[in-house]
Amino acid sequence: MSKEINRLHPISAIITSAKVLKSMILPVAIIFVTNGFKFSFNFTSDHFLKTLLLLGIWIVVAVLAVVSGIIRWRTFVYWFEDGELRVKYGLFVKKKRYIPFERIQSLNYNEGIFHRLFGLVKVQIETAGSKDGKPEAELTAIRKAAADAIELEMRRAKKQIAEETEDEQPAQMTEEEVVPQIYHMSIRDLLVLATTSGGIGVVLSGLAAIVSQFSDIIPYETVFHELADFVKIGAFLVALTVMFILIVAWFVSVVITLINYYEYTVRIEDEKLIITKGLLEKKRITLPLNRIQAIRIVENPVRQLFGFATVVVESAGGNGESGKDKKITLFPLIKKQDCLETLEQLFPEMNWHPEFIHSPKRARPFFYRIDFIWLIPIIGACSYFLYPYGLLSLLLVPLTILLGIWQHKTAGYMIDGKQLTMQYRVFNRITFFMEKKRIQSIESTQTYFQKRKNVMSIKATVMSGMTGMTGNVPSLEQKDAETILSWYEH
């Protein structure tokens, strides 16, 4: 095994520095806004000294960021020795990390804009001991050939251990293997995903948040009068303007979705799922099948209507899509039937067509009765202060009852051997598939009113992220809840 010392690409110094400078953007923006944009380079101005001081601080921090990036690049080295990936870095405090190849669970690749310009890749090395969502080691920028060499050494080490354990003849090692593809996202799927994901609301709320930061600058009173005059022109123009805003928000949502999920592909190799995606920043996430704790099939009302679903994997480790998060979206958008067929191929031991035992009819009021605690004061306030239009808030009562009935019809569970499946909803319908050996805890709760009706709520938690992922089926038949508890007892 090679003991040659390898270094990061020089561009890693720029990437590290840019990461530090990027973290400064928000504090700088806050200072800029809170100061009321009162900056001046005129030495006679009252704001000149303040401007000079802030500018000096920013320059010092920027220089320190560049220096730290250069130091990180110059001191970081890695090499292969005795079946391990060895990493050493640090200027005054030297740090070494030895990672046995057989302990490596996954190699995740990221290709940002800088990486793609120079044919580089960022490699995140994860083991079962990776904590807080952080990789065991991170190679900021190396050549793709160097990344392939790490993966090749890892495969050789694991195959050698397997051969020693099983006493088999060594199989020929190939650097490139045909990896079967089990899912690919088309442009049509991207458009449907963007339209049904609620991204339009996120864009509009983000725009509103940005506008609210400039409340001291925007003349809201003048704008309000202009809008009032505009409304008088005609309802058609108002509707046209609203439609134009929604179209723009939809277009922005599509662009964001395209950037995040472009060429989204899932492949399977050596008992691992390999997810690749991204337009500006290409990512490759490796997920060992044995680290999957549970699987959730999520259907929002619109997607459920058209037979689409999202599949989310709860993982015991590895980087999720949000750093510390261990929730990995396996299939962002897939036909429900295709989803079940694919999951049957990946996990043939699981029952993907559950027959649920649902919440009893007498438990229905528990799904909406508690909502009136916060609903009645809101209706009362709206009706009093916004009379007569505030009386429209009374419509919240039948809508809440209908939502509760919908939730009641969804709530259910199934036990099949060593598998527990839960189904529930707030708005989205969630079907939660868990194996008994993966469940960390099962908890039952029963209020005084539930006890009178002989119903009980059940929660099951699996390891995922910092706090785990919990499935919750409210107000089941008491004997059904006790059956789940008895099933889980060792």
Image: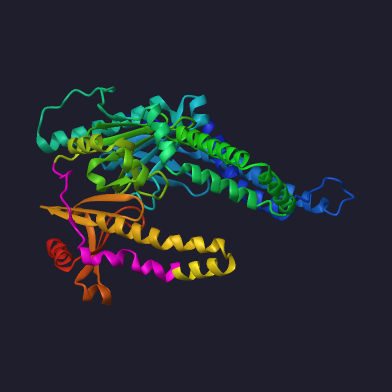
Residue 49 belongs to magenta span = no
Measuring from the top left, give residue 435's x and y in whole percent: 18, 51
Q: Is residue 127 above or below residue 376?
A: above
Magenta stretch: give its range: 349-375
Q: For the N terminus, give its image quadrant.
A: top left
Measuring from the top left, give residue 80's x and y in whole percent: 34, 34
Residue depicted at x 36% and y 69%: 370
Measuring from the top left, give residue 125's x and y in whole percent: 36, 40
Q: Is residue 348 visible?
A: yes
Which picture quadrant has residue 257? Answer: top left
Residue depicted at x 30% and y 29%: 152
Colour mapping: rainbow
* Residue that lies at the very extreme toward the right in this rendered image: 44
Instruction: Determine whether, in the image, residue 185 is placed left or right of residue 453.
Output: right
Residue 373 belongs to magenta span = yes
Residue 134 or residue 102, whichever sits in front? 134
Which picture quadrant has residue 177? Answer: top left
